[in-house]
Amino acid sequence: MNPAATHRETRILDGDDLRRAVTRISHEIVERNQGAGALVVVGIQTGGVWIAELIAANITAIEPAREVALGTVDVSMYRDDLAIRPVVPAAPTDIPCDLTGATVVLVDNVLYTGRTVRAALEALNDHGRPRAVQLAVIVDRGHRELPIRPDYVGKNVPTHMADDVTVGPEGVVISTTMEVSAG
């Protein structure tokens, strides 16, 4: 008997839930930093960019007198697993200013092992020495391999290692594929 695979998808946040989480995170960022004065919001290519754009827009709406600097970072060449993964640049890094002395809010869609965040921290150093780096994610799924903890989280979701978590404007979906024996 050959095992068969069964696929299950579970929506854990819908589009409205996701927008509320991003709005909450935006307010938490402003509160924690006593305003938006020295903030630079940087989205990790590709999953964190659109979320960073929403956060920056929300912060600007909260504090209209300040325009929040918004950037993107591609971590492809900074990964520590280059020997086992193909290098595929996602999109160019675009940091709009020198990060020296700034508080950088690094944004990604999902925090899993922490390796992408580690690579992003290294990439940011090419653009100055920030005063602080804070991490905002929509989903923290655990399974950390490095001692990295987010400052702002949309939702903590315990997952299995084989699960796939997809974050998009329409919400968050966990896809699980399980082998079941036929017969």
Image: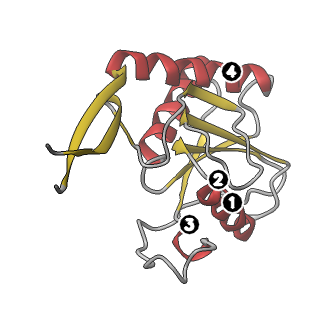
Q: Are marks 3 and 1 in contact (CB under 8 Å)?
A: no
Mark 3: which secondary structure? loop
Residue sticking out furthest to the bottom: 83
Dot in front, 4 or 1: 1
Q: CA distance from mark 3 to mark 2?
A: 12 Å
Residue identifier under label 2: 114
Mark 1: which secondary structure? helix
Q: Are marks 1 and 2 in contact (CB under 8 Å)?
A: yes
Mark 2: which secondary structure? loop
Residue identifier under label 4: 28
Is 29 positioned to the left or the right of 165 in the image? Answer: right
Mark 4: which secondary structure? helix
Residue identifier under label 3: 75
Quadrant housing the C terminus: top left
Residue identifier under label 1: 118
Q: Nearer the viewer, residue 2 or 43?
A: 2
* Type of amino acid at the residue the image marks with label 3: Val
Mark 3 and mark 1 lie on one chain; the one further toward the N terminus is 3
At x 51% / y 25%, what residue is drawn? 22
Residue 70 locus on image (x, y percent):
56, 46
Packing grade of label 3 (10 A; few <14, some 14-19, many >=20) is many
At x 36% / y 16%, what residue is drawn? 16
Residue 1 versus residue 51 in the image, above or below: below
Residue 150 locus on image (x, y percent):
69, 38
Q: Are marks 4 and 3 in contact (CB under 8 Å)?
A: no
Is 90 positioned to the left or the right of 39 in the image? Answer: left
* Type of amino acid at the residue the image marks with label 2: Gly
Dot in front, 4 or 2: 2
